[in-house]
Structure formats: C-alpha cells, structure tokens
Image: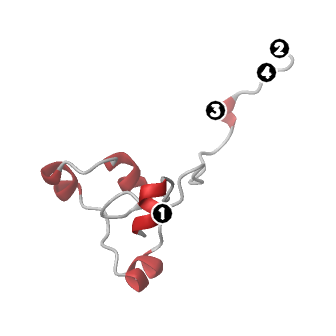
Amino acid sequence: MTGWVNGNDYARSAEVFGILPVDRITQNKLGMLEYCHEHATTMKIQFPDLAQQQGTHSAVLPVHTAEEKAFF
C-alpha cells in the first residue's frame, strides 16, 4: 500500500495537545490544590475532566465575559 502509515509502528507520546497541565511548583506558588476525584464527584464541580487533565482542584478557565472581566 502506498500513502498509508501504520500507526502501530510508533510509540505513544505523553504530549498534551490543547490542555496544559499546571505543574506542582506553579500550584504551590499560587496556593492551588491538586485534583481530587472524590472532591470532584462529591461537589459536582464544573468541567471535572478538564480539571483532571490540568491536575487542579477545579478547572482553570480564562476570563472572557464582560461581567467576569469587571469582577476580576
């Protein structure tokens, strides 16, 4: 076959696309807690999958609405 690449010939990467994990040094510096599955399910936090991938207690999202900008 031409033009076909067997993906099984390659090793998986730990690279993350689009969602950056927050490293422990930054979390400690900012007083952030690390992700806790029990907390996420008990408190029914918004975007638990995102928080887990970021490694943070709650998902870190940008400030984007006028109301949020005025608040922060």
Q: Give the alpha-carbon distance from disc 3 to disc 1, as whole Å.
A: 46 Å
Mark 4, residue position: 4
**x 34%, y 47%: residue:** 47
**x 64%, y 32%: residue:** 8
Considering only order in the chain, which callout, 1 or 2, is on the residue closer to the N terminus? 2
In percent of width and height, residue 56 lies at 36, 64
Mark 2, residue position: 1
In percent of width and height, residue 40 lies at 22, 53
Q: Give the alpha-carbon distance from disc 2 to disc 3, as whole Å.
A: 16 Å
Considering only order in the chain, which callout, 4 or 1, is on the residue closer to the N terminus? 4
Considering only order in the chain, which callout, 1 or 3, is on the residue closer to the N terminus? 3
Mark 3, residue position: 8
Amino acid found under the numbered disc labelled 4:
Trp
Mark 4 or 2: in front is 4
Describe the element under mark 4 as helix, strand or loop: loop
Mark 2 or 1: in front is 1
Tell me if mark 2 has few (under 14), some (14-19) or many (20+) residues whose alpha carbon lies within 10 angstroms of its own. few
Image quarter of the N terminus: top right
Q: Give the alpha-carbon distance from disc 3 to disc 4, as whole Å.
A: 12 Å
Mark 1, residue position: 69
Amino acid found under the numbered disc labelled 2:
Met
Describe the element under mark 3 as helix, strand or loop: helix
Tell me if mark 1 has few (under 14), some (14-19) or many (20+) residues whose alpha carbon lies within 10 angstroms of its own. few
Q: Nearer the viewer, residue 71 or 51?
A: 71
Residue lying at the far left in this picture: please name it. Answer: 42
Q: Tally the numbered discs.
A: 4
Say whether residue 61 is visible: no
